Every structure is written in C-alpha cells, then in structure tokens.
Amino acid sequence: MTRLGSSDLDIAPLSLGGNVFGWTADEATSHAVLDAFVAGGGDFIDTADSYSAWVPGNSGGDSERIIGSWLAKTGKRDEVVLATKVSQHPEFRGLAADNVAAAARASLERLGTDRIDLYWAHYDDAATPLEETVRAFDQLVREGLVRYTAVSNYSAERVQEWVRIARENGLAEPVALQPHYNLVTREPYESQLAPVARELGLGVVPYFSLAAGFLTGKYRTQADLAGKDRGQMVGGYFSEAGLAVVDEVVAIAEAHEVAPATVALSWLRAKPEVAAPIASARTVAQLPALLASITLDLSADEVARLDAVSAQVPAAA
C-alpha cells in the first residue's frame, strides 16, 4: 500500500480512471470493470463531475452516476478511495465558492455517498480569487463532505500560492497533485511541478499515464488510429522519438513477460513523488495489464533505459 501525500489515505499504487464510464464503456461493462478492479487488488477510483459531457446525449456526471449505481449494488463504499473533481461540469463551471459547494453536493448525490475522499480542483479558475476557492474547499472539509482536497492541472506557482493561503489562514491544505505526465510527456512536470510536490509533500497522481493508449504499443502507425475513439488524442504523441519509446517499453515488457502498459505504469510508479498513476479500462480484458503494474518493480537499469529514450521526445510547445 502507498500513503497518499500527507493524508491518511492508504491506496494500492494504481488509480482506475472513470473517464470511460458512460463513454466507451456502458453501465454494465463499467460495473464489470469496477468489480474486476477491486477483486484484483485495486481500491482507488478517480472520476470527475464533467465526465462525460462531451458525448452526444450525455450531460455530465455520467461517470459519477455509474460509479454510484455500482456502489449501491455492491455495498463496497468503505472498500474504495473515491476521488472526483470540480470546475468543468456544464452546470458548475469554475471555482467560485457557491459553485464549488453546489457542485460537491451534486457529485455526492450522483455517487450516492456521504463523503468524497479526495476532491480535486480540476482546472485553475483565474476569474475567481484563489483565496475564495481555498476557503470553499476548506468549508467542505469542515462540513465532513470531503476528507481531503487536491489540485489538478495547476501551475507550480499556483500550487505554491494555494498552499501559502491555506497555511496562513489555517485552512485545509491539498494532499495531492494531478498532472499530465507519462513517458512521452515529461515536461513541464519534471522541471516545474515535481520539485513543488517534493517540497510540499504532495502525492502525485498522473493522468494520461499511458498517453491515451499510445504506450500500450497498439498504435504503431497513423493507420492504426482510424475510427478509434481516442484517435485525436493519441495522434499528438506520434513521432519518431515517441515510437522509439514504445519500442523500448515493448522490449522490457517482453523480458518480463508482461504487457507494455504494465511497464509504462511501473516506470511512473518508480518516480519518487508518484503515488498512483491513473489508467482507465473500457473492458475487463484490459485490466490485468494495469493491475500487474502494482507488483512489477523495474530494475534501476530498466528505469534508466526508459529515462534515456524518453528524454529524446521533444517537449510540447
């Protein structure tokens, strides 16, 4: 088990992403994935109130509703650490205090629970004074609706400012940071955010850990993307240097007789501040590769090989 930042949340070092629930996985399939995830030793579920508002016919909160129906069916609420986010739901945009309070209550209703274990500020809101947002999150903790707060997609400077405000005013401090970080996207996390996470004791929970599936090795040419739900996202990772990373991941995976996804996630887990990479599964068949990363420890040489080849990938502009 891994302790998440300065909290008392002990988690298996893998988070199941709920972005596919209600998108590429219907309710029955999502329930099966959740069943298999918990049966396989997973206990950390990450979603957002905006998932999956981008799908025709959806309105946002779809993933939360599916997770809530699973919790009601299985009674496993106390067996999982539940994380969700605020700021992007079509009806609850931004991080003004009244909006945060209303959005949290709406999430609790959809999830069918009395508390959110980890509540993320999904994206920074420059239109709202940061102190207002920090106080709003603190109020949710004081009311017992949220156990711990966290920040996602924030710059290093804004994370530091959030913590400064919290400390100066005796408010709840964030315990975790959720950045875009993987073998083909190492910046700006490594140079800017990792030092801040280290300094402030934040547990890091990277998203796009598998680069939208690119690091699984199943997309080796642009033709492989044709008709795929994530084609546009994956396409941004294609480059000669990116494919060289995939080749190295595959080579190490073959040596361990595991899937490439297992190696990509294990590389993240080897990074000091990383508590649990996020990875999603739209089918039960995709889960074993993800769960295997919990126990696969790469050697120092393997980590160094992956570090070296991934360092050749140009940082995004």
Image: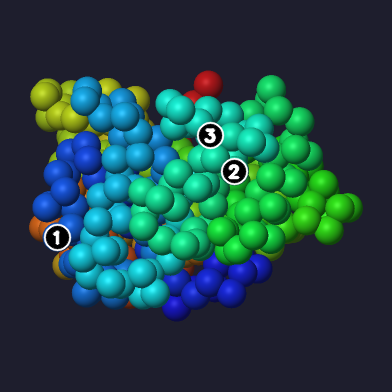
Q: CA distance from mark 2 to mark 1?
A: 32 Å
Pick the quarter of the image with the N terminus: bottom left
Q: How many marks?
A: 3
Task: Please report the residue visible at 75 percent of the width from the left and 38 percent of the height from the top.
Answer: 132
Residue for badge 1: 32
Please name which of the two marks, 2 or 3, marks the residue nearer to the observer. 2
Neighbour tally class for label 2: few under 14, some 14-19, many 20 plus, Cα within 10 Å: some
Q: Residue at x 16, y 48 (%)?
A: 27
Report whether 203 appears left or right of 225. Answer: right
Residue designated by label 2:
101
Q: Could you give the CA–CA distance between mark 2 and mark 3, rounded to whole angstroms?
A: 11 Å
Name the residue that disc number 3 marks: 87
Residue 157's tag is none
Q: Earlier in the sequence, mark 2 or mark 1?
A: 1
Q: Secondary structure at mark 2?
A: helix
Disc 3/disc 1 C-alpha distance (Å): 29 Å
